[in-house]
Amino acid sequence: MGLQARTWERVMLASSLDHVVVATDDEKIAECCRGFGADVIMTSVSCQNGSERCCEALQKLEKCYDIVVNIQGDEPLIEPEIIDGVVMALQRAPDAVFSTAVTALKPEDAFDTNRVKCVVDNQGYAIYFSRGLIPFNKSGKANPQFPYHLHLGISCFDSKFLKIYPQLAPTPLQLEEDLEQLKVLENGYRMKGLGCKHACVGATDRRRRLELLSVLASGETRSARLAGQEKTRTIGRQRARSHTEEVEKPQISFWPELWRHGTRTREDAAASGQSRERASKRSAGLAIGLNGPPNA
């Protein structure tokens, strides 16, 4: 099973999403995704990034959604709990237009420019994102005692802001770092961070990534032996999910308080004050396809 199909199955396990579609400008990706049952929306090749692609896909959807989640199409290990967490983080922060997730940065990824770092304030709002190590000290070395944050590739938008985003001119920091979320911050909008105690697989940890994918595949193989009926496929997905949770179960942290996923409902969040405005809003998950041929 390819990366897009695996990612699709993981995203479908999220409880906060009312609708999940694949948005892509590549017909090969579209054909591949339709093959495993995904809804597909074709978008323009002129989209500069995933946020603009999400905006175009949202405009083409017949239904209206208040929250839109941008999930990269090549994230086969994405945790449904993290998807639900970023949705709730935005629901609970009515002064924010965007939410995202961060986790602990591994020492070996400190100077990897493909691993985006993030710093947040004491309320969990993003201050800055960079491909370089931030904060950076005078020694020029990573401080093993400092809790550096790694940005996870998931974005959650207020749909009204998402419609505005493509109209905003590119900003200097966005262009220099090549990070689309910096355009949000440079224009003065607030972005809420979700802290995840999550065993994130680093770019250099190929062996670990293959081990986790093997765990997913083993659950799927057992279900395939049962007969190929819809019921057995469902059992297979449940088994695959339970096995990966044995390997790594994310712990969610809403700054400034800690919150373990599954111990608090959205109704509880609605009663907590600031979340009341957004708690009833619907969300749509948009899994963004790669700009190239589908992976086998």
Image (cartoon, grey):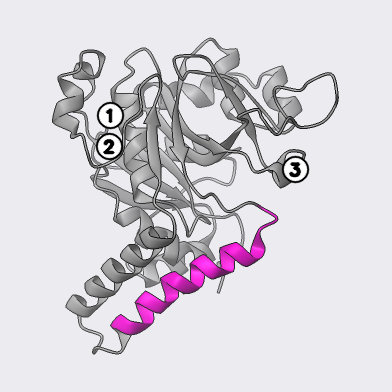
Discs 2/3, front: 3
Name the residue tied to disc 2.
Answer: 283
Residue at far top of view: 188
- Residue 116 screen position, x and y as percent: 65, 36
Name the residue tied to disc 1.
Answer: 66
Q: CA distance from mark 3 to mark 1?
A: 35 Å
Which residue type carries mark 2?
Answer: Ser
Q: Which mark is residue 129?
A: none
Residue at figure coordinates x 41%, y 78% from the top left: 218
Q: Secondary structure at mark 1?
A: loop
- Residue 158 screen position, x and y as percent: 36, 25
Contact (Cβ within 8 Å) of mark 2 with mark 1: yes
Q: Residues within 10 Å of mark 3 (few under 14, many from 20)?
A: some
Q: Residues within 10 Å of mark 2 (few under 14, many from 20)?
A: many
Comparing 269 with 56, the one in front is 269
Q: CA distance from mark 2 to mark 1?
A: 6 Å
